Amino acid sequence: MMYPIVLHHEEKWNLVHFLEERNIETREMMPLLTQPVYIDLFGNIEDQYPVARWINRNGFYIGSHPYLTDEEVDYVIEQFHAYFARK
Protein backbone atom coordinates (compact mmCIF):
# COMPACT_ATOMS: atom_id res chain seq x y z
CA MET A 1 0.00 0.00 0.00
CA MET A 2 1.08 3.53 -0.62
CA TYR A 3 0.00 6.96 0.51
CA PRO A 4 -0.04 9.66 -2.18
CA ILE A 5 1.40 13.14 -1.63
CA VAL A 6 0.93 15.96 -4.16
CA LEU A 7 2.91 19.23 -4.08
CA HIS A 8 4.18 21.83 -6.49
CA HIS A 9 6.83 20.26 -8.73
CA GLU A 10 9.93 21.95 -7.28
CA GLU A 11 8.73 21.24 -3.76
CA LYS A 12 8.08 17.62 -4.65
CA TRP A 13 11.71 16.86 -5.42
CA ASN A 14 13.00 18.73 -2.38
CA LEU A 15 10.71 16.72 -0.11
CA VAL A 16 11.46 13.42 -1.88
CA HIS A 17 15.21 13.95 -1.37
CA PHE A 18 14.67 15.01 2.25
CA LEU A 19 12.64 11.87 3.01
CA GLU A 20 14.97 9.51 1.14
CA GLU A 21 17.95 10.90 3.08
CA ARG A 22 16.07 9.89 6.24
CA ASN A 23 15.35 6.34 5.02
CA ILE A 24 11.72 7.01 4.15
CA GLU A 25 11.19 5.39 0.77
CA THR A 26 9.23 7.16 -1.93
CA ARG A 27 7.91 6.06 -5.31
CA GLU A 28 6.81 7.90 -8.41
CA MET A 29 3.14 7.93 -9.30
CA MET A 30 2.00 5.07 -11.54
CA PRO A 31 -1.00 6.46 -13.39
CA LEU A 32 -2.99 4.22 -15.68
CA LEU A 33 -2.68 6.72 -18.54
CA THR A 34 1.10 6.22 -18.73
CA GLN A 35 1.21 2.43 -18.45
CA PRO A 36 2.59 0.78 -21.61
CA VAL A 37 -0.41 -1.50 -22.16
CA TYR A 38 -2.79 1.46 -21.86
CA ILE A 39 -0.72 3.49 -24.32
CA ASP A 40 -0.72 0.52 -26.72
CA LEU A 41 -4.51 0.27 -26.50
CA PHE A 42 -5.48 3.95 -26.51
CA GLY A 43 -2.40 5.91 -27.55
CA ASN A 44 -0.70 8.64 -25.57
CA ILE A 45 -3.77 10.48 -24.27
CA GLU A 46 -2.29 11.95 -21.09
CA ASP A 47 -2.55 15.50 -22.48
CA GLN A 48 -6.33 15.06 -22.72
CA TYR A 49 -6.43 14.78 -18.93
CA PRO A 50 -4.56 17.82 -17.59
CA VAL A 51 -5.44 17.23 -13.94
CA ALA A 52 -4.22 13.63 -14.07
CA ARG A 53 -1.06 14.80 -15.85
CA TRP A 54 -0.48 17.49 -13.18
CA ILE A 55 -0.93 14.99 -10.35
CA ASN A 56 1.44 12.55 -12.06
CA ARG A 57 4.15 15.20 -12.40
CA ASN A 58 3.70 16.69 -8.94
CA GLY A 59 2.91 13.65 -6.84
CA PHE A 60 4.68 10.73 -5.27
CA TYR A 61 3.94 7.94 -2.83
CA ILE A 62 5.30 6.99 0.55
CA GLY A 63 4.97 3.43 1.73
CA SER A 64 2.26 2.30 4.08
CA HIS A 65 1.34 -1.13 5.36
CA PRO A 66 -0.60 -2.62 8.28
CA TYR A 67 2.57 -3.67 10.11
CA LEU A 68 4.02 -0.19 10.54
CA THR A 69 4.66 0.38 14.21
CA ASP A 70 3.49 3.47 16.03
CA GLU A 71 7.15 4.47 16.34
CA GLU A 72 7.65 4.22 12.57
CA VAL A 73 4.54 6.28 11.89
CA ASP A 74 5.67 8.86 14.45
CA TYR A 75 9.09 9.02 12.78
CA VAL A 76 7.54 9.73 9.37
CA ILE A 77 5.30 12.41 10.88
CA GLU A 78 8.29 13.99 12.65
CA GLN A 79 10.20 14.16 9.39
CA PHE A 80 7.32 15.91 7.63
CA HIS A 81 7.13 18.39 10.51
CA ALA A 82 10.90 18.93 10.32
CA TYR A 83 10.78 19.53 6.57
CA PHE A 84 7.91 22.00 6.63
CA ALA A 85 9.23 23.80 9.74
CA ARG A 86 12.18 24.91 7.58
CA LYS A 87 9.84 26.85 5.31
Image (cartoon, helix red, strand yellow):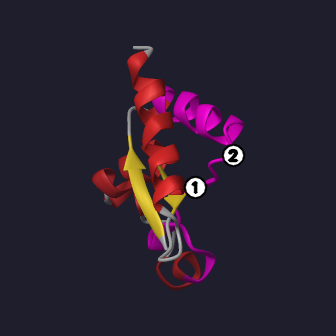
Q: Quadrant of the C terminus?
A: top left
- Structural crowding at the residue carrying mark 2, measured as other residues with C-alpha within 10 Å and reported as few (<14), some (14–19) or many (≥20): few
Q: Give the side of residue 35 with respect to residue 57, left or right.
A: right
- Structural crowding at the residue carrying mark 1, measured as other residues with C-alpha within 10 Å and reported as few (<14), some (14–19) or many (≥20): some
Q: Provide residue 48's location: percent of width, then percent of height.
A: 33, 59
The residue depicted at 45 percent of the width and 14 percent of the height is 86
Q: Provide residue 28's location: percent of width, then percent of height.
A: 58, 55
The amino acid type found where label 2 is placed reads Asn
Secondary structure beneath label 1: strand
Q: Provide residue 20's location: percent of width, then percent of height.
A: 67, 41
Decide: is 54 above or below 70: above
- The dominant secondary structure in magenta is helix
Q: Provide residue 11's location: percent of width, then percent of height.
A: 47, 28
Decide: is 81 above or below 51: above
Which of the two discs, 1 and 2, sits closer to the camera? 2
Q: Tell me, yes or no, whether the highlighted magenta stretch contains residue 31.
A: yes
Secondary structure beneath label 2: loop
Q: Nearer the viewer, residue 59 or 74?
A: 74
Q: Quadrant location of residue 63? A: bottom right
Q: Nearer the viewer, residue 70 or 20?
A: 70
The residue depicted at 46 percent of the width and 55 percent of the height is 73
Residue under label 1: 28
Specify start and end residues of the magenta stretch as a single range. Answer: 10-37
Q: Which comes sooner in the sequence, label 1 or label 2? A: 2
Q: Tell me, yes or no, whether the highlighted magenta stretch contains residue 12.
A: yes
Residue under label 2: 23
The amino acid type found where label 1 is placed reads Glu
The residue depicted at 66 percent of the width and 38 percent of the height is 22
